[in-house]
């Protein structure tokens, strides 16, 4: 039997007439604080969410845990796997908290089979793992091609919208481009999130780049362990865990990643060189920005760097493009140059202008409050930040010279 594509003929409805809606927008908590916060509260019934990411990053794990939680909460769930066998899927469900819950498992590649089961099993929440391995055999192209991926996602979305199902599609991102990437689906779905992380680390980040039902830019942070993914505790300070306090050349900057504050460490190493062309080696910062800051130090403060190599890096593989990091960079350089550590309780927040003046950064309050939560008690900030933050001494500085003096970085 071929399942007819559900094509609604357009018709006008009155905004007052809520009864004409096939379902109300209901949000289901994922059971994970981090997953919920990245989605603005949870997964919405009748919506389609794409979870993209490289193979092995943890997409199946994340979604299995969600289904286990939802099923334990009484929701009817279906896991469609077009990649793994029934024992593999069932084994993962039972290991990840779903041992006592009942979750439908469908092993199928053929779009029609999946459509049929969606209509007959009547689930509230469906995971399709992955959309690139589902295909419509009436199309000439092979599974994973742009045509197939688009057609399959469109048809499954139609059913999800009409039946009020929360549909979660897994999309592999492959470096070699053998599969059509999730990007071809971004405009088709309501929510797009990418699951990222380093193979060598247990940290996983869910980054929401499109969201029809809430704000974008929020992140969820997790740790992959033996029992699957756990919400990362103390996510704000994750990049500071290996920081050695009291080292010259190290400063802390509360960066914004999406809407979330992440404390980052800037490290500088300034060493004498006999070379006519001193080296500037930079990781995690924009070279042009660093050169500008070094020029400001030379010209406005009289710091002599022409006979020094300067190495700068941001720890934890973070890339900072926010000019609010300028002050932390400058303080790290001077701290290394004079070989004096900055007090470990200080965070630096401020953009540096060409005249050496400090501009107050956006979201300074949010950055300071989050730093305070992690034990920082002094914020060196721009003069235009007029608020007070309980527990933190905010030192307002108008220029680089004043900032360095407040951090006890004196030099001759
Ligand atoms: P998986 O969710 O299968 O990745 P994806 O669906 O994105 O391809 O997760 C794969 C990796 O995660 C695998 O290398 C094993 C690891 N893992 C754990 O470390 N702990 C666990 O509890 C689970 C289920 C997986
Ligand atoms: Mg998988």
Image (cartoon, grey):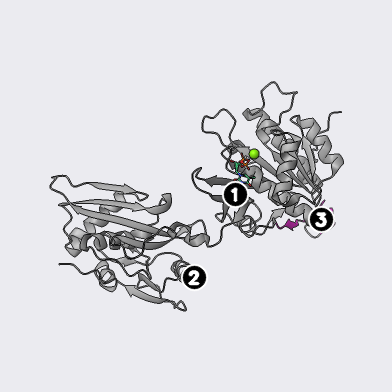
Q: Residue at x 66, y 59 (%)?
A: 41
The residue mark sitting in front, 3 or 1, is 3
**Residue 103 sits above or below residue 233 on the image:** above
Secondary structure of the residue carrying tag 1 is strand
Residue placed farthest to the front in the image? 226
Label pair 2/3, CB-CB below 8 angstroms: no
Residue 25, magenta (yes or no): yes
Left of 99 or right of it: where is 355? left
Marker disc for residue 267 = none
> Label 2, label 3: how many angstroms apart (C-alpha)?
37 Å
The residue that disc 1 covers is 210
The structure residue drawn at horizontal position 76% and vertical position 36%, both measured from the top left corner, is 86
- Indicate which disc residue 74 carries: 3
Q: What SS does tag 2 mark?
A: helix
- Residues drawn in magenta: 17-29
Displayed-image quarter of ligand 1: top right
Look at mark 2 in the image and give the residue it sits on.
373
Q: Are marks 2 and 1 in contact (CB under 8 Å)?
A: no
Percent of width and height locating residue 146:
62, 29
Q: Quadrant of the C terminus?
A: bottom left
In the figure, residue 107 lies in which quadrant?
Answer: top right
Give the position of the N terminus as an image quadrant. top right
From this viewpoint, is residue 231 visible? yes
The earlier-in-sequence mark between 3 and 1 is 3
Image position of 371 with respect to 178: above or below:
below
């Amino acid at each position: 039997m071929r399942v007819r594509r559900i094509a609604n003929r357009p018709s006008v409805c009155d905004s007052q007439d809520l009864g004409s809606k096939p379902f109300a927008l209901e949000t289901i908590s994922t059971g994970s604080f981090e997953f919920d916060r990245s989605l603005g509260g949870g997964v919405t019934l009748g919506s389609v969410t794409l979870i993209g990411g490289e193979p092995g990053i943890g997409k199946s794990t994340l979604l299995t845990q969600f289904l286990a939680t939802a099923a334990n909460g009484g929701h009817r769930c279906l896991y469609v796997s077009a990649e793994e066998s029934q024992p593999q899927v069932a084994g993962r469900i039972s290991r990840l908290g779903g041992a006592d819950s009942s979750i439908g498992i469908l092993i199928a590649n053929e779009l029609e089979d999946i459509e049929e089961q969606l209509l007959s099993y009547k689930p509230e929440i469906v995971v399709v793992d992955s959309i690139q391995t589902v295909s419509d055999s009436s199309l000439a192209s092979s599974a994973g091609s742009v045509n197939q991926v688009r057609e399959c996602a469109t048809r499954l979305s139609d059913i999800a919208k009409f039946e009020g199902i929360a549909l979660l599609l897994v999309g592999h991102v492959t470096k070699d481009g053998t599969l059509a990437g999730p990007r071809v689906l971004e405009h088709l779905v309501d929510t797009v999130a990418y699951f990222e992380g380093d193979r060598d680390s247990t940290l996983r980040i869910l980054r929401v780049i499109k969201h029809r039902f809430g704000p974008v830019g929020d992140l969820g942070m997790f740790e992959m362990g033996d029992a699957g993914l756990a919400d990362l505790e103390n996510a704000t300070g994750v990049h500071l865990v290996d920081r050695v306090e009291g080292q010259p050349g190290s400063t802390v900057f509360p960066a914004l990643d999406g809407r979330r504050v992440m404390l980052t460490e800037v490290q500088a190493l300034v060493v004498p060189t006999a070379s006519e062309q001193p080296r500037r080696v930079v990781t995690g910062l924009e070279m042009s920005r660093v050169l500008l800051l070094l020029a400001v130090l030379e010209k406005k403060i009289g710091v002599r760097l022409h006979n020094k190599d300067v190495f700068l890096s941001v720890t934890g593989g973070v890339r900072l493009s926010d000019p609010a990091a300028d002050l932390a960079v400058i303080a790290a350089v001077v701290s290394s140059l004079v070989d004096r550590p900055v007090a470990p309780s200080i965070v630096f927040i401020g953009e540096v202008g060409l005249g050496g003046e400090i501009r107050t950064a956006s979201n300074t309050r949010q950055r300071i409050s989050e730093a305070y939560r992690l034990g920082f008690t002094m914020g060196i900030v721009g003069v235009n930040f007029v608020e007070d933050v309980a527990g933190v001494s905010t030192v307002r500085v108008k220029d680089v010279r004043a900032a360095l003096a407040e951090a006890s970085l004196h030099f001759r």
